[in-house]
Image: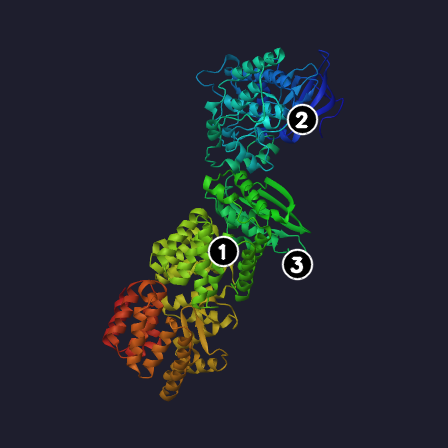
Amino acid sequence: MGPERGQMLSHYRLVEQIGAGGMGVVWKAEDTVLNRTVAIKILPADLAVDEKRRRMFLDEARLAASVSHGNIVQVHELGREGDVDFIIMEYVEGQPLNEVLHGRPLPPDKVADWGSQVAQGLARAHRKGLIHRDLKPANILVTPDNEAKIVDFGLAVLFAPRDSTLGSPASALTLTLDETRTRIAGTLPYMSPEQVLGEKLDTRSDIFSFGSVLYEMTTGRRPFKGTRPAEIVQEILVSRPQPMQELVPKVPLDLVRIIDKALARRPEDRYQGMDDVAVDLKRLRKDLESGTSSTVGAARHASPARRRRLARPVLLGGALVIAVGLGLLVQRRGGEPPAPEKAGHARSAIAVLPFQNLSAEGTHAYFASGLHDELLTQLAKVAALKVISRTSVMGYQSTSKPLKTIASELGVGSVVEGSVQVVGERLRVNVQLIDATTDEHLWAESYDRTLNDAFAIQSDVAQAIVVAVGAALTSTEQRTVTATPTANAEAYQLYLQGLVYDARPGILKSNLEIAQQLYERALALDRNFALAHAALSVVHGRTYWLRYDPSPSRAAAQRAEAMEALRLEPDLPRAHFAMGMSHYQGRREYQQALDEFQIAIEGLPNDAELWQLVGTVNRRLGNWDTVISAFEKAVQLDPRRADLYTILPARTYGFMRRYPEAVRAYDQALSLAPDLHVAAIERGRIYFRWQGQLDSLRAVLGRVPRDAEVGTLGSVAAQRAELLLWERNPEGLLQMLRTEPADVFDANWFFLPTALYVAWAQQLRGDDAAARAAFGQALARSDSALREDTDDWRAHVTHGMSLAALGRHDEALREARWLQASVVYQKDAFEGTALAEGRARILAQAGEVDAAIDELDRLLAKPSDVSMHALRLDPRWDSIREHPRFRALLSKYTER
């Protein structure tokens, strides 16, 4: 329960509340002993329990009491009644300067008079070793007697004056100043550049703030008047205020000079002491009274040299993001720092949970997902953060799990929640940032804007989050986070819609087609929309790579869009991502792809997909250690993405024959997604290659649904066919194939007509005529595939195996030579091994046994899927099984 009228605190009776702030409420009160009116600032009970805030409250009183001056509201004593702390201060009849101004300029003589009084009061505080840090019109009281008094030393700090020691009263103070109190404190529009940047402050910071107050007194307007924090900081650090002569006619020239000097961006260019400001203002006041002050019209401006100095570029560093969050700091009493982090994950490790969609289903239902995706992209640009990727956070959509549990599972210290609603043409977004350890709200904001403000909202939110978790942006990151991707709001909305379809699970052809249409519509509205060109390029690439459209024209379209994105914005990370994908998917130019991905990572260091691709491409180059380290980075950013464990670590460990590690990685994937059938089947195949046992694979295929999605494994039927072949079960294989509707098992690494399995089954049965007929059917099917794509190495393997089985050895050996000359065989350390294994089968069947065994020896000596157990059990090697070199090969690798 708060203080009440008539309540007694010691010998002070509360009369009426006259003010309130983040660190206390101020009451007018009666001193019943000395029979005088005083002001009492009372620390609220909910803050008194926080020892850090209580110390700050007491420090304010001690610091202010150390300075005695007629233009500073005096502190009489510090009191405590029960559990209530309070400060007894001089009661001043009057108005805060901001209420006096109310957007109107003061006469120059008033500016000089009141300004000189404030300057004298500040000069005294500076001599006592204090910096106010929050000088603004609201902290200056003007009395009916024309006195100006400084109030509120809540943010004041002790400092060591330049070239001197503290004066006696200040140095005698024994204060326990909280070491966590940040230098980045105050009220943004009045902060000095060094205060915004979080640098060490001295009295010249107060001089800059005072210059801002004088400017507002003279013009009725703040010198830095942006509507958003980032705009205000941009003005403080880069721009110069609008010339006062343009706002107020006949402004005194000396007043312009005083204010300009106080507002110099570099501290060394300002007044070096507040005494000097006071002297110049007092002289101006006398000149105005005597009529000897000159004025300057609106045409007079600062010198060219000064304009160049004021306009010089400034390395913003963390400045803008610091400022964006200063609204938060001010809400906490104009600069109280965030609480020290508790044990656990750092606050800078962030999970942005899926935004709740409050819009009606229909045209704008995509906004929640689109804004969520773009916010993740913006945060991914900040190297100081760890940002969990989309796939991991999407699993918490509509979850009822406590935030602490979510944070623990994702390895983060902060969680972002939000909601999005579109009503008519209004976009309403609510976002909050929560410390997952303490459940404390670090920052929250509501936005009610037009649909055209979608980008500005997510950019502002990203910057505020960076500040609130105690991180900072580099100047490059600042530019990329705030750079507007397109001036066409409708184009940006179409782009957001495209992202939603692009990100849907499964990479289905239908979703890629819709995404392509949306990106193309966005580009029809703005041909210079580089981000949309990059996104369209990626869609073309996925369509080509997944063989939805393997035509050369699709690969050409992928490259053309990436090139256009880079032409428009050479530094755009997503453009380099798109070009890297074009090198990787469209041309198999792996080193060039890596070069582009490395550039993209500089701008998107938290993008898990990029790190995954770095691992994937390095695997193509045979850089195995780099593959593992890239995976480790990717999994930090996307720890709940089950298929990531199968794409990189498990598949790579298996390939490197580090089988126990591969099994553990598959187990990790299955613990996250028990129905990830591809991981379960791959795990069974690992046991076959590792130990030669088929029980694990048999058990998995016995329970996996026939129509289950198994990604790069093609289909469940294809895996069952392999199992039955390895089991040497021709009757079971033929029975299964009779019910198989597809005529080919088709996946990234194989193109195997079902007729081929029929042929192998008939060979096991000893029916050579039936086998020959089936090989003929397989040959016809591979002929058809090669007519559609002459560069499909998978079809060349099938074609060669069928020719060799039919006794057409010369033609089969031509296929073996084609495969050996192919770019996949020559340059791809990963996929090329599957091609090489197929080539070895052709050579063995065509009677080139030594060449076949040489190929197998090379595959066993390096990472590949070929294993001694597979060679021993697979009947397709029966034609050379008794050859002495083959038996020696098995013996050689069994001994290892």
User: Which residue type does callout 1 highlight?
Assistant: His
> Residue 774: x, y in percent?
40, 84
Q: Residue at x 61, y 13 (%)?
A: 291
Q: Which residue is mark 1?
A: 533
Mark earlier in primary sequence (3, 2)? 2
Q: Marks 3 and 1, how far apart in space?
A: 26 Å
Tell me, yes or no, whether the two marked residues, 3 and 1, touch with CB atoms within 8 Å. Answer: no
Residue 582 visible here: yes
Q: Amino acid at mark 2?
A: Arg
Q: Are marks 3 and 2 in contact (CB under 8 Å)?
A: no
Q: Which mark is residue 9?
A: none
- What residue does disc 3 label? 362
Residue 529 in the figure: left or right of residue 332: left
Residue 96 on image: x %, y %: 67, 23
What residue is pinned by disc 2? 104
Looking at the image, residue 312 sits to the left or right of residue 143; the answer is left
Q: Position of residue 74 (x, y in %)?
A: 63, 16
Q: Give the SS element for disc 1.
A: helix
Specify few, some or many for label 2: CA neighbours under 10 Å numbering under 14, 14-19, or 20 or more.
Answer: some
Above or below — where is 449 with respect to 683? above
> In the depicted view, which residue is nearer to us: 548 or 260?
260
| Residue 208 location (% of width, % of height) | 53, 24
Split into 4 quadrants, where in the image is the C terminus? bottom left
